Amino acid sequence: MAYAITQTCCNDASCVAVCPVNCIHPTPDEPDFGTTDMLYIDPRSCIDCGACADACPVEAIFPVDTLSESLKPYADVNARFYDGKPVSGDVLGSSPVFHNWGAPTFDRTISSDFPALDVAVVGSGPAGMYAVEDLLLHTSARVTLIDRLDVAGGLIRFGVAPDHPSTKRIDETFARYREHPRLTLRLGVEVGRDVTVDELAARHDAVIYAVGASSAKSLGIEGEQLPGSVAATDVVSWYNGHPDAGHPDASRDVVDLSSQRAVLIGNGNVALDVARILSSDPGGLEATSISRDALARLRSSSVREVVLLARRGPEHAAYTEPELLALTRHPDFDVVVDSHDDRVAKAIDAAEPGEKAQLLRSLVQEPVDWSAPPVGGRRRIVLRFHSSPLEVLGGDRVTGLRTSGTESDVDIAAGSVVRAVGYRGVGVPGLPYDEAAGTIPNTAGRVQGRDGTYVVGWIKRGPSGGIGANKTCAQETVAALLDDVRSNRVQPRQPRKRAGLLRRA
Ligand SMILES: Cc1cc2nc3c(=O)[nH]c(=O)nc-3n(C[C@H](O)[C@H](O)[C@H](O)COP(=O)(O)OP(=O)(O)OC[C@H]3O[C@@H](n4cnc5c(N)ncnc54)[C@H](O)[C@@H]3O)c2cc1C
Ligand SMILES: NC(=O)c1ccc[n+]([C@@H]2O[C@H](COP(=O)([O-])OP(=O)(O)OC[C@H]3O[C@@H](n4cnc5c(N)ncnc54)[C@H](OP(=O)(O)O)[C@@H]3O)[C@@H](O)[C@H]2O)c1
Ligand code: SF4
Ligand code: SF4
């Protein structure tokens, strides 16, 4: 009986290095690494040693025969990845032998006289922490880790949904580095408010900005600013108890829970998170890290139906397979597909195993009367494809959303409209900023026009990719920094000129 990787996999590849028979793929040096929704264990080669499960920071790996009912489908998800592929690892016939690791190779060589750098890392989310980890483990650098919030963790703490506790557990791995003797932690310090970019640069040999993407994209449609029309960023902050005091919506009920239907625009994993939290039995959220205020309000929620509106078809859905699979097997609600457009059924019928549209084959497809209140019975999530948002409807507040339909526009009656169409980076005063992309312009992490200044994570690449994607991103940025020191593009200052405490203004 093999092991299998399940829903919470964040692609950080910690398991790959420990597998003695090399049966977890794609590995970071294979071309499809970073393009798959998760990593997969080849059940034909797995020898059941359990090393991967011990190494996984988010508890995503289990023996197949112990999988809970909701995780059972992941055994097939793992196996299917290997359909038609040769057996993984070094195998003799069908029986795996222990991997012949060969001579060790080191991608990065640090000479013994490499200077001990003073590096500031701004942002304690995954990208900042992977950069910190790389610097502390592979160089003798001293690191100052800065975050504007009083709590470290970035989106692990304030983005990842409270009903994903094992994903949040990855912060325990990062916390080890926050206590490292060569790291100084400065929480509650905002670059641009408490310290300037130039001040930080003057006090350190290099500065890495890992400030994420904290604002929301807008749609630019009429009615978007009406009360009751909100961004998913605000809803996520609300249920995660974001401490940002200046946040206008953080302390109140940002979603109108008094109406029976809410519409979410977009069908990425953030939309799935919000839909799941709004539709779950609040009792099941009691033991999670959900904000007590949000939980209290969810207990009196009238929302019976959450609609996920996608402008494209099910074959192009933005959610990942593990997250959609978990949604469809959730015990608290049903998931159905709005059958309004023939292309939806056709795409689902034509999909091959492993393709996105195929994931919906087991779901009920039915027409929905959008002018009427939701049907009674269990709570449900309705997936509506091939339908674009045209206008948020309402006078004083939201009463619905006008969407494109097959023959004419369709008005969906709803008390809340949540746009989950993506996050957006915010510029740091003193650094260049690409307004269109919402990123800091850079080449392989080097900020353009500012030697010694680097970026990593969502502010470098844009707001996409799970936690693990920031690991390779951080490796690239740190490699650029070290190359710049080697080539004298960045010159470490003399020790006596270092230091200076950062003080909050
Ligand atoms: C709602 C949501 C749920 C998610 N859930 C998952 C999941 O379950 N699994 C998964 O694999 N991925 C998940 N992701 C993706 C994952 O969270 C991101 O890949 C990751 O957080 C990006 O890391 P980052 O470090 O670039 O940004 P962030 O995590 O946003 O970290 C940025 C940090 O910078 C700090 N900061 C910003 N500006 C300043 C400043 N001027 N001065 C000082 N500090 C500053 C912020 O306070 C923050 O701590 C989710 C994303 C979202 C939005
Ligand atoms: N593993 C997890 O549990 C988890 C949880 C949350 C987030 N994340 C990750 O975090 C990243 C960000 O997630 P996200 O959901 O914010 O972004 P996303 O995956 O990019 O999804 C954005 C969604 O918004 C839609 N959209 C964008 N502009 C639109 C417009 N003008 N009109 C209508 N729809 C529009 C997109 O549709 P199109 O596809 O048609 O553009 C897409 O459905 C992703 O990589 C995600 O996987 C992971
Ligand atoms: S989260 Fe990392 S260690 Fe765990 S299964 Fe996924 S890639 Fe492997
Ligand atoms: S249980 Fe052992 S052999 Fe199987 S995938 Fe994990 S590390 Fe590899």
Image (cartoon, rainbow, N blue to C red):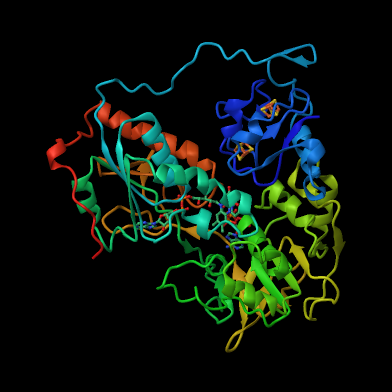
**Left or right for 301, reference 66:** left
Place of residue 425 in the rendered image (x, y in percent of width and height, measured from the top left): 43, 57
Place of residue 463 in the rendered image (x, y in percent of width and height, measured from the top left): 50, 52
How many marks the image carries: the answer is 0
**Left or right for 392, reference 158:** right
Q: Is residue 359 above or below residue 66?
A: below
User: In the depicted view, which residue is nearer to us: 322 or 224?
Assistant: 322
Q: Residue 318: in sight, yes or no?
A: yes
User: In the depicted view, which residue is nearer to us: 102 or 450?
Assistant: 102
Q: Is residue 375 above or below residue 109?
A: below
Q: Is residue 389 above or below residue 428?
A: below
Q: Residue 353: in sight, yes or no?
A: no
User: In the depicted view, which residue is nearer to us: 286 or 158?
Assistant: 286
Name the residue located 36 percent from the left edge and 43 percent from the top edge.
442
Report the residue that reaches farthest toward the bottom.
396
Name the residue located 63 percent from the left edge and 72 percent from the top edge.
295
Place of residue 92 in the rendered image (x, y in percent of width and height, measured from the top left): 75, 10
| Rendering quadrant holding ligand 3 | top right
Quarter of the image for the C terminus: give it: bottom left
Name the residue located 70 percent from the left edge and 26 percent from the top edge.
49
Quarter of the image for the N terminus: give it: top right
Place of residue 385 in the rendered image (x, y in percent of width and height, measured from the top left): 73, 60
Name the residue located 16 percent from the left edge and 37 percent from the top edge.
495
Examine the image and state in which quarter residue 20 appears: top right
**Left or right for 362, reference 240:** right
Examine the image and state in which quarter residue 448 appears: top left
